[in-house]
Amino acid sequence: MKTKRYKLRISGLRENEGQIKSAVLQRVLDALTKTSERATRLQATGEGSAKGPKPKWLDASLDFTITGLEAGSTVLGIEAPLLAETAYEEFAQQEFWHDQPSLDDTALDLAAYAIQEAGDANSAGDRFDSGVLDAILKFRKAARTSGIRYELTSEGSAHGQFTLDERVCAQVNERMKKIPAPKAFIVSGRLDEIKHGGGRFRLLIDSDSQLLGRLRPDSLDAEVLRPLWGKPSTVEGMVHFKANGQPRLIEAYRMSVCVEGDDVFKEMPSVGKAEVQGLAVAQGMRLRSADPMELAGAWPGDEPIDELLAQLD
């Protein structure tokens, strides 16, 4: 199996150079593995955290090998398998997700990209969500002492590098507080592309806007995508947002062919808009004061969209 070699340098430990307490080592590796897991899952599925057991491809991607412990602060040698070896099916469709990782990357590379972007106050948030940021902050508590600094470098490559210290962790903590919560939306557009095996799709809203999505497994089967491909479709679900407020993807509870009146939903979701989108003032409609999750709870049923609109009249 093809792998890449890394060195993780830990500075500021209480122990002598080249030494580390076993409990501290366990917590550091847990933080590194959890950050890699969530950053990789985010790039594959659009969300860093998920319930249930890890898929086999993700377990294989996290099968790191510690190759040695060196002095010069405390340096861990690590080998990680390429995504081409462990997750080819998940990442081979390069044009599907924005900023798709290379098959020559590893899960450690994706963790490094996430940490780099989380430490940049001006970044959009393509590489991290709240789950990834929470995993990064595990480094902060791993050594249980202040002044710890982590530096990851990749042998023979400019990729797979990060520096993580208290300043960066403080930035990560602030970014996590500001990520918008998911909101319920109805969105219409043309189903332009699907990745059937993963239940992922792309919705073209207009010539300049597209929204990526995935099916919620407990609500929809991937077969629902087949008859909708290339057709104007309406999607009901929860929209997840990036740190900059732009939509990352919609998690679909229900999908159907567009019917008359669905044009009001042909608009990109945004944080400041109502949870049920498309009820514009220009259409002469008013939102009643109601908990949007009451509607969201009803979405997996068989009610047509015109009935939902009637409820909001």
Image (cartoon, rainbow, N blue to C red):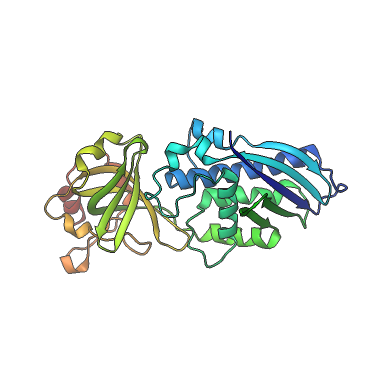
Query: From the image, which quarter does the C terminus lie in?
Result: bottom left
Residue drawn at the location 66% of the way across and 40% of the way down: 79
Residue 127 visible in this rendered orientation of the protein: yes
Please say if 54 is above or below 134: above
Residue drawn at the location 52% of the way across and 40% of the way down: 83
- Of the pair 267 and 191, the residue shown nearer to us: 191
Residue 118 at x, y percent in the picture: 57, 59
Residue 302 visible in this rendered orientation of the protein: no
Query: From the image, which quarter does the N terminus lie in?
Result: top right
Residue 49 at x, y percent in the picture: 50, 43
Please say if 239 is above or below 24: below
Residue 298 at x, y percent in the picture: 27, 42
Q: Quadrant of residue 218?
A: top left
In the rendered view, does 179 fall on the left or right side of 261?
right
Residue drawn at the location 50% of the way across and 52% of the way down: 129
In the rendered view, does 112 fall on the left or right side of 286?
right
Q: Residue furthest right?
A: 16
- Of the pair 284 and 36, the residue shown nearer to us: 36
- Of the pair 29 and 197, the residue shown nearer to us: 197
